[in-house]
Amino acid sequence: MSGIKPKHQRLVLVSFAMVAIVAAGLLAAWALRNQANYFYLPDQMMADPPAVGQAVRLGGMVAEGSIEKQPDGITISFVVTDQGDARVPVMYKGILPDLFVENSGVVAEGSLDAKGVFIADNLLAKHDENYVPRELQEMSEHQNAYRPEDTVVD
């Protein structure tokens, strides 16, 4: 490059840098294309279901009376519903979160199978704004008023 003017050398270097940045961005987008999890509510999943095997999240409420333990002891089935008539059957194999109960919020990560059953790989139980940890449920209102994290030191 000794025969090229410094102005042209800079132009060539900037061009190479721009091509490298664009190539890195395209490579990152291509690598992450299957990592995006879309969030569905039960009525959305019933109206426009995702492709079989596509990783998505399903959020809603656990329908009352729908939790059934399967004979193997680690698989459960339940129904996720919303405020309307939409109901999505879910199968999950694993340890349930402590807050997982009927009529509570849940987010299930997984995919639909060919039969329309949502196969969950992970469950996230949601709690309402009135949630109190088990450790604090036994405390009286008077004791609860003097928890150390609520005290202010000047």
Image (cartoon, rainbow, N blue to C red):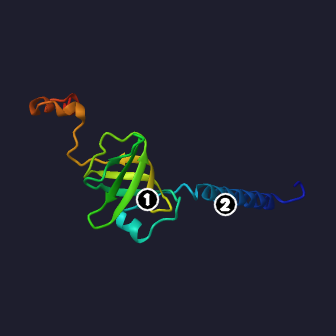
Can you tell which mark lies on residue 146?
none
Q: Looking at the picture, which amino acid does disc 1 mark?
A: Val
Indicate the position of residue 10 as horizontal and vertical percent values: 76, 58
Kind of element beneath mark 1: loop
| Disc 2: which residue | 22
Q: Is residue 48 above or below residue 89?
A: below
25, 47: nearer the viewer: 47
The quadrant in which residue 17 appears is bottom right
Kind of element beneath mark 2: helix
Q: Is residue 47 left or right of residue 16?
A: left
Q: Residue at x 20, y 45 (%)?
A: 130
Looking at the image, do the residues carrying marks 1 and 2 touch, with CB atoms under 8 Å apart? no
Q: Looking at the picture, which amino acid does disc 2 mark?
A: Val
Indicate the position of residue 31 as horizontal and vertical percent values: 62, 55
Q: Residues within 10 Å of mark 2 (few under 14, many from 20)?
A: few
The quadrant in which residue 142 appears is top left
Q: Is residue 51 left or right of residue 80?
A: right
| Disc 1: which residue | 117
The tally of labels here is: 2
Mark nearer the N terminus (1 vs 2): 2
Q: Quadrant of the C terminus?
A: top left
Foreground mark, 1 or 2, reads 1
Indicate the position of residue 40 as horizontal and vertical percent values: 40, 62
Q: Is residue 40 left or right of residue 149?
A: right
Q: CA distance from mark 1 to mark 2?
A: 41 Å
24, 119: nearer the viewer: 119
Q: Residue at x 58, y 55 (%)?
A: 32
Q: Is residue 69 above or below residue 19?
A: above
Q: Is residue 94 above or below residue 58?
A: above
Q: Is residue 11 left or right of residue 28?
A: right
Q: Quadrant of the N terminus?
A: bottom right
